[in-house]
Image (tube, rainbow, N blue to C red):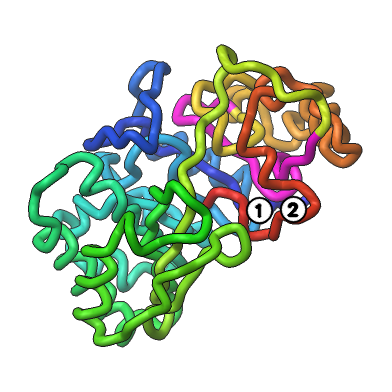
Amino acid sequence: MKFLRTYIEISNICNLQCTFCPEVGRDKKILRVEDFRKILKQVLPYTEQICLHLMGEPLAHPEFPVILKICEEEGAVIHLTTNGTFLAKYGFDTFLKSKAIRQINFSIHSYKDNFPGKDIRPYLYDILQFSKEALTEAPHLYINYRLWNLQATTEAKNENQDIIDHVTEFFQMPINERIDVGFKKSKNITGRLYFHFDTRFKWPDYQDPENGNHGFCHALSQQIGIHADGTVVPCCLDKEAGIPLGNLLQESFEDILKTPRLVAMREGFKKHVLTEELCRKCTYIKRFDKKARPDTAPI
């Protein structure tokens, strides 16, 4: 078994509170660096990529540079998702010279969500300048500017016109602003730099109505998640560990992958049967119908 990506939540704490992300009901938790190494060493043989989040802002971890160093030492391929507000704190070289980071996703929709009416240009400047340097100094690094705040699947312009204008003006690279995110989410800006558009979606909740027991998900085939307390969950949308599959600080990953609950879920997805209540209440799962493309999984 080989997952495309494994989410390791190094902290469930965030310095912002976006309407896009629900609040975390779990106790606030920062993963100790020694526990991170223990978890990382166990999952690396089973995964191609490591994402340093599930909930929370990874750069809010007080020992983030140490976390990054461990990733380099262990040979992990890192996909980093961040709101970008701590970028200057660590300095550009922390990211540009890292041998582990292969992709950075900047959730730039977060700024207007938290600071409505405030000038976005100072916030964008650091991200834009960093990206400019990355294009010349880090040829291995891909960067996405996430705009996951669309209301409709065919229009990116109205939601984010000022952001698009600032970015295209900085790089002097106009893009086609109309996009059908049900077909293709990314728009190249220049080089290895992209806009990544998506519509809003809702995290599943046990209080939601069920949508039936038929459906498919990439959980436990392409992805798996680990919370900051070591709890293993099937996917990055199980924010409260509603489907705990084991704990990597107490059990081996190999043993957890063989547990009856995990195996039943994985086999159920293959047969398009949803064995778990939370999955039957998940609306995101509707994106994985026969018309869905492989890039519709949240990253």
Whether residue 175 is visible: yes
* Span of residues in magenta: 215-231
Q: Position of residue 195 (x, y in %)?
A: 40, 68
Q: Is residue 200 above or below residue 96?
A: above
The extreme top residue here reads 207
Q: Is residue 127 magenta?
A: no
Q: Position of residue 282 (x, y in %)?
A: 63, 29
Task: Name the element at disc 2.
Answer: loop
Number of residue marks: 2
201 displayed left or right of 104: right
- Tag 1 and tag 2, C-beta contact below 8 Å: yes
The picture quadrant where one finds residue 60 is top left
Q: Position of residue 200 (x, y in %)?
A: 46, 43
| Location of mark 1 (residue) | 47
The extreme right residue here reads 271
- Residue under the point 50% across and 39% down: 201
* Mark sitting on residue 2: 2
Residue type at mark 2: give it. Lys
Q: Residues within 10 Å of mark 2 (few under 14, many from 20)?
A: some
- Residue under the point 54% across and 60% down: 181
**Of 281 and 179, which appears nearest the observer?**
179
